[in-house]
Image (cartoon, rainbow, N blue to C red):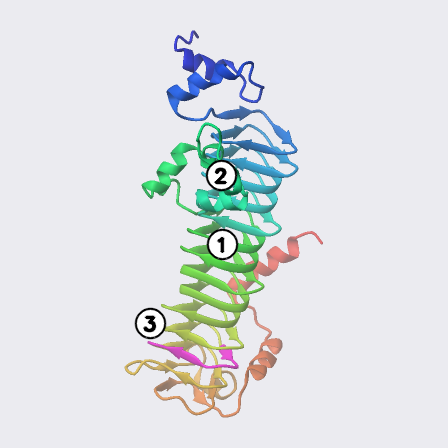
Amino acid sequence: MRLSNPVITYLYTKAPMTKRTTPATKKPALAALDLPAPVQTARLKRKQFASTGDVHIQGDAVIATQFIVGGDCLIDGDLEAEEVFCLGKLTVTGDIRVQSLYVGHALDAGGNIDVEYLIKTGCSADWMARMLELDQRKPAADGSSYMDILVHPAILKRYDHHDAFGGFGDIQALGYVACADLDCHGNVQLDDVLEVGEIQFVGGHLSAAAIHVAGDCNCQGELFSETDIQVEGALFAANLICQGNLDVASIHSQGDISTWGYLRATGEVSSLRGEIHSGRWIATKGSIYAAKYIKTGESLVAEKGISCGADYGILAATSLPRSRWATHGFVSAASKPRLLLSGQFVEGKKLKHIDALEKKRETELDWEVPRRLKREMQPV
């Protein structure tokens, strides 16, 4: 095919990874388009890589130190690097294994995301420039800004127009995500497990097969798990749905808190505008408060007190016959709660009593069976 336009001829006949033959060759083309040239290569293995334009790698990318992309980046393979800075959308069809990962817009992975330190999305160009210390450089001789050597002009326009390109700040992965800290501007949607040291911020909704957080978890939207949720610190979410067991230090929600299994906490449990619903039992060393109903399939224990909405009530032992209320459907607190509609009040019960009953439990619930089978089928 004959390319008559000299600008197009240059971009498609010159390999972008090769050195310039003459400094004047590339300037007229870039001046005409006012955009940096895209980079495309079959595979990338470098000590360091930086490009102001869009990048498409048709294979794996293995970078020993920093991987910096000022535009969008598509990698048809795996990504390995020390630090990754992508101001646009980062799409990796395989796995991501890096020390730190900073993305301006969305992050999409076809495999697992394994980050040693921080994952941060929704990063501004100014913030990345400060991280890279580009703002401390002396002004260029031609008067251009340090942003010109970092970010694709189209990316800056997206920020100016607040264009949610591909989901601003979103994280999507078909595998698991593991990192020390997570700071996400948008939604997090995973097909596998989320294993995090601390969730500093999730600006949207969080969904995963299972969730384990060693510290605190702050989710501004709905938090959903297909199985268990374990948060060793404080958990905040606008709404919470757990299709398994929920184990936290404390939990606060603007809306409903709902779990198919039990809800175990060592601190306060509160729903400011909704109800608290557990398919099995709820137990905490602290207090329990819900603006509407509090419902449990079995027992309800809060060592410091239980309270619900004035025009609602407390429904315990909803899945048990009345004959078992005293042993498995009891309600216990510092004082008998008002508006107790079902369940038997028993004084002096604590979290440790519920834990002891749980250890003696023999029957397996329907939703627990496939998870046990899956664990047993995994190789040791």
Residue 366 is situated, as x and y percent measured from the top left of the image, at 51, 64
**Residue kind at label 2, given as amino acid type:** Leu
Can you say whether 344 is above or below 49 in the image? Answer: below
Part of the protein shown in magenta: 282-292
Q: Are marks 2 and 3 in contact (CB under 8 Å)?
A: no
The residue that label 3 is drawn on is: 273
SS for callout 2? strand
User: Badge 3: few (under 14), some or many (20 or more) residues near its Cα, within 10 Å?
Assistant: some
Distance from the alpha carbon under mark 1 to that under mark 2:
16 Å
**Label placed on residue 183:** 1
Of residues 46 and 193, the one drawn nearer to the viewer in this rendering: 46
Label 2 Cα crowd, 10 Å radius (few <14 / some 14-19 / many 20+): many
Query: Could you say whether the residue bearing mark 3 is in a helix, strand or loop?
Result: loop
- N-term mark: 1 or 2: 2
The residue drawn where x is 45% and y is 68% is 259
Q: Earlier in the sequence, mark 1 or mark 3?
A: 1
Q: Residue at x 43, y 21 (%)?
A: 30
Question: Which residue, given by chain and number where applicable, does mark 2 sit on?
Answer: 90
Q: Is residue 106 visible?
A: no
Camera-nearest label, 1 or 3: 1
Residue 271 placement: quadrant: bottom left
Observer-side mark, 2 or 3, equals 2
As drawn, the residue found furthest toward the right would be 380
| Gap in angstroms between the C-alphas marked 1 and 3 | 26 Å
